[in-house]
């Protein structure tokens, strides 16, 4: 469903009786985070906090992505991959580069409907600094207050493409904050481009409170070169309505809170500690400083927050939705991939299971290397490849495949000094760490020097007769299904 803004979504959920409205006063100091984490663990619907301690006039919303059902409702389908599959099919041939293909898309596919549209803003300039917004402290030993579901908007200085990403923002004082964009992420990539062209100030906007699909896109690994606004248009089925700020950055015109300014790319300060999505505190690391110039608010603003911690919390369900929505794109890059599963307890960068149609010796390793070379999949620590008949979503089938196809010395590949999730405390020298690939496919003769043994299979006629017996006796005694 297309919602023009966060308010339309909140109204929709309220009408369906799927909004938990809390009238009691709640503090942004640990209480909000505790409450929305509990709500998420319990699969409760989004939580709207109507009275925020020390922030009169503000509302806070959390737990929007409360489970995978939240996405199925948003897109109106049980199979999220269908949303992007049609789009990818319309590519025809595999693109040489994403940039080449996507820049010609609106014309080639008459997709004018999904491109961003310029529109007057619903927000107005306000005399509010960073201390005036209800950023939250999420865990007792966090360094301070954080904006946890705030989108960073920026523009590629070369191509003009719009990027938006969700990176945690640590509030330092009324005018300054730290932006935790990790190496490999869009924000960090753009920062390098600004620095290369001799610019130390990168114009950005921090935006909180947009429609849920735009928020999802910001948190998604959209391939570089593809304008994230365009991708949001593809998923929403309708282009984003945008407003250009004085610093040239485009933001959704119906956003709740917009903080315009720039990042001083040479002003790095220690960020953290922060209780992160691994369920541990990330130690301090240097990140660049955002300097606030202007704030814009909607009337009675609604501030969108989340809290990460031990899985499965909202980021886990965002990861699951992303896994489904991006499957067709992964197949574009590594066509032999049939399905993939990034288990929520594997934290999306920890463990990935992929099934393939194996055709030749060494095929599984080729796939591993292709995946480790693709966008944010390159962060995967453990990558398991199984045959196409294994259901990757059934962990027992995967364990069975590992048990019956893997000789560890032959089928486990360790790669050293690869790029990893920089939050991973197990990594000796972040962001560089080792990776493990497990080839859990059935082996070909060339791979093991002997024939693969035959698997047991019932005699068809006998099975048919026994089926009938099972039906008769089983249903009578309710022993068999
Ligand atoms: C709640 C939440 C918090 C996140 N925090 C960070 C963060 O602090 N730093 C980071 O690099 N990525 C963070 N991410 C992941 C990025 O949003 C994600 O990798 C996204 O692809 C970034 O967009 P980009 O690929 O355009 O950079 C977070 C995601 C979510 C859902």
Image (spheres, rainbow, N blue to C red):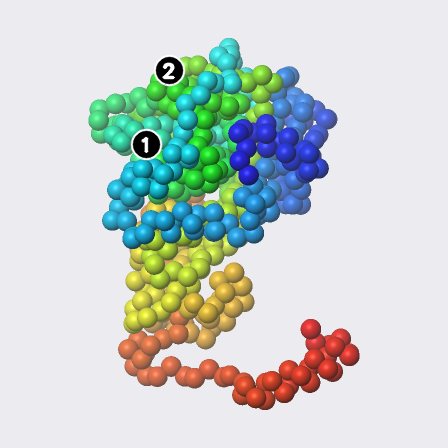
Beta carbon of the mark 2 residue lies under 8 A of ligand 1:
no
Q: Residues within 10 Å of mark 2 (few under 14, many from 20)?
A: few
Q: Residue at x 74, y 82 (%)?
A: 473
**Farthest residue, direction front:** 110
Which residue is at a point 64% across and 86% down the rendered structure image? 466
Q: CA distance from mark 1 to mark 2?
A: 17 Å
> In percent of the image, x 35 and y 18: which residue is there?
247
Q: Nearer the viewer, residue 439 or 4?
A: 4
- Which residue lies most toward the right here? 476
Q: Which residue is mark 1?
A: 161
Say if residue 390 shows up in the picture.
yes
- Residue 389: x percent and y percent? 46, 69
Q: Quadrant of residue 116?
A: top left
Residue 109 location (% of width, % of height): 35, 42
Which mark is drawn over residue 246? 2
In the displayed structure image, the side of residue 474 where residue 208 appears, left or right = left
**Quadrant that contains the N terminus:** top right
Seen as rendered, the residue at the extreme top is 127
Picture coordinates of residue 394, whole percent (x, y): 54, 63
Residue 465, horizontal then vertical, whole percent = 63, 87
């Amino acid at each position: 469903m297309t919602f023009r803004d966060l308010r339309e979504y909140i109204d929709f959920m309220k009408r369906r009786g799927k909004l938990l409205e809390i009238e009691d006063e709640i503090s942004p100091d640990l209480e909000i985070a505790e409450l929305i984490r509990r709500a998420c663990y319990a699969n409760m619907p989004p939580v709207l906090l109507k009275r925020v301690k020390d922030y009169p006039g503000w509302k806070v919303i959390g737990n929007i992505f409360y489970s995978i059902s939240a996405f199925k409702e948003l897109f109106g389908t049980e199979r999220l991959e269908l949303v992007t599959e049609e789009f990818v099919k319309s590519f025809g041939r595999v693109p040489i580069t994403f940039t080449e293909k996507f820049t010609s898309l609106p014309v080639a596919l008459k997709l004018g409907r999904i491109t961003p549209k310029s529109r007057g803003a619903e927000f107005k300039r306000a005399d509010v600094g960073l201390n005036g917004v209800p950023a939250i402290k999420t865990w007792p030993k966090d360094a301070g207050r954080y904006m946890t579901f705030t989108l960073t908007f920026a523009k590629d200085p070369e191509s003009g493409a719009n990027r938006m990403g969700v990176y945690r923002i640590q509030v330092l004082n009324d005018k300054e904050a730290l932006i935790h964009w990790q190496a490999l992420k869009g924000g960090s990539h753009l920062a390098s481009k600004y620095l290369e062209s001799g610019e130390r100030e990168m114009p950005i906007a921090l935006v909180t409170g947009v429609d849920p699909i735009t928020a999802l896109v910001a948190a998604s690994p959209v391939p570089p070169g593809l304008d994230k606004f365009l991708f949001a248009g593809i998923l929403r089925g309708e282009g984003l309505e945008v407003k250009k700020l004085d610093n040239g950055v485009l933001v959704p015109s119906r956003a709740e809170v917009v903080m315009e300014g720039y990042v001083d790319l040479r002003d790095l300060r220690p960020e953290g500690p922060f209780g992160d999505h691994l369920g541990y505190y990330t130690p301090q690391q240097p990140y660049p400083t955002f300097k606030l110039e202007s704030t814009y608010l909607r009337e009675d603003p609604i501030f969108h927050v989340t809290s990460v911690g031990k899985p499965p919390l909202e980021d886990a369900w965002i990861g699951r939705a992303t896994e489904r929505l991006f499957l067709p794109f992964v197949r574009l890059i590594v066509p032999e991939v049939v399905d993939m599963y990034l288990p929520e307890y594997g934290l999306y960068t920890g463990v990935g299971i992929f099934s393939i149609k194996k055709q030749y010796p060494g095929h599984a390793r080729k796939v591993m290397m292709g995946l480790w070379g693709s966008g944010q999949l390159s962060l995967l620590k453990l990558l398991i490849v199984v045959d196409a008949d294994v259901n990757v979503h059934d962990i027992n089938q995967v364990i069975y495949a590992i048990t019956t196809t893997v000789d560890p010395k032959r089928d486990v590949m360790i790669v050293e000094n690869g790029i990893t999730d920089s939050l991973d405390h197990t990594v000796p020298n972040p962001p560089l760490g080792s990776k493990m690939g497990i080839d859990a496919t059935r082996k070909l003769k060339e791979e093991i020097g002997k024939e693969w043994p035959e698997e047991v299979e019932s005699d068809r006629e006998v099975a048919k007769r026994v089926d009938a017996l099972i039906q008769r006796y089983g249903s009578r005694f309710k022993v068999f299904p």
